[in-house]
Amino acid sequence: MAKYQRIVLKLSGEVLAGGAYFGISTERVKSLAAEIAEVSRTGVQIGLVVGGGNFFRGVAAAAKDMDRVTADHMGMLATVINALALQDALEKAGVPTRVMTAIEMHEVAEPYIRRRAIRHLEKGRIVIFAAGTSNPYFSTDTAATLRALEIHAQVIAKATRVEGVYDKDPMRFPDAVLYREVSYLEVLAKALGVMDASAVAMCRDNQLAILVFNLNTYGNIMRISMGEPVGTLIH
Ligand code: UDP
């Protein structure tokens, strides 16, 4: 029996690139889709929010001479490309999906309508929320928070490349200590850098739990859904 009935899974764009830093690895997308499909089949309702960092980020060096708003629009469009790649792979894995975009593009996907999104979830469709919040100066972490609150998800599962939240950067400091649980306040005060501060603050203000976990360990999404102790719970 799953612990969570409805979750929002936040994937950065980079995870779709596999070993590379740019673009889409069809192999990685396929294996990810298989893992997510398995969880969906247990009856857990899944909203997916995907980033666009494997193509473009509004704050990236490539955008330094650009108007920020234009650059952010490019970043949001990048998330749509990723959403379509995930949709394709998930449907091949046998799960019905809908892509809903915060920026309207009817020929490509449905516009985001909250009640319709909830209906899709209730019917067992994975909903992939694309184009962030549609607003520049935000991130897909904030988009994940916003959507999770709107659809009344019980948790945001935030995928990373490490086990969870550490007291310092585990990539740079081998003695970094992993937290099993940590408060929103501590994440913000110590700038633990797992998620955008604005997203963490929004979760805190609305008491939405965040579970930070290692996506590179196969089966972790299932473990989270079943309530097994994985990663770090920010609450
Ligand atoms: N973005 C935005 N508003 C949003 C979400 C995203 O402007 O609500 C833009 C922003 O430029 C961001 C890019 O889209 O850098 C890609 O999103 P993000 O950096 O969150 O992707 P990730 O790091 O998760 O791959």
Image: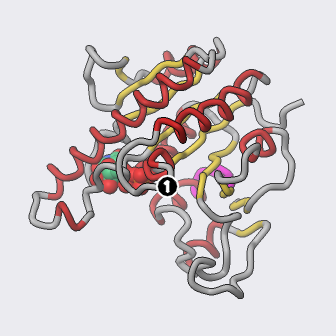
Q: Nearer the viewer, residue 41 or 110?
A: 41
Residue at (79%, 55%) from the top-left corner? 230
- Whether the magenta-drawn stretch holds residue 153 is answered as no
Quarter of the image containing the N terminus? top right
Three-letter code, disc 1: Gly
Residue receiving disc 1: 19
The figure's colour scheme reads secondary structure
Q: Nearer the viewer, residue 5 or 218?
A: 218
Residue 4 x, y percent position in the rendering: 77, 36
* Residue 150 in view, yes or no: yes
Residue at (24%, 50%) from the top-left corner? 72
Residue 178 vs 100, above or below: the answer is: below
Question: Relative to 96, is 52 on the left or the right?
Answer: left
Question: Relative to 77, is 82 on the left or the right?
Answer: right
Residue 125 x, y percent position in the rendering: 60, 17
Residue 84 vs 183, above or below: the answer is: above
| Secondary structure state at the residue bearing disc 1 | loop
Question: Relative to 210, is 72 on the left or the right?
Answer: left
> Where does the magenta region start and end?
205-211
Residue 222 x, y percent position in the rendering: 77, 39
Quarter of the image containing the C terminus? bottom right
Residue 6 x, y percent position in the rendering: 69, 31
The picture quadrant where one finds residue 31 is: top right
* Residue found at the far right of this picture: 1
Question: Relative to 189, is 62 on the left or the right?
Answer: left
Residue 171 vs 138, above or below: the answer is: below
Residue at (85%, 55%) from the top-left corner? 229
The picture quadrant where one finds residue 61 is: bottom left
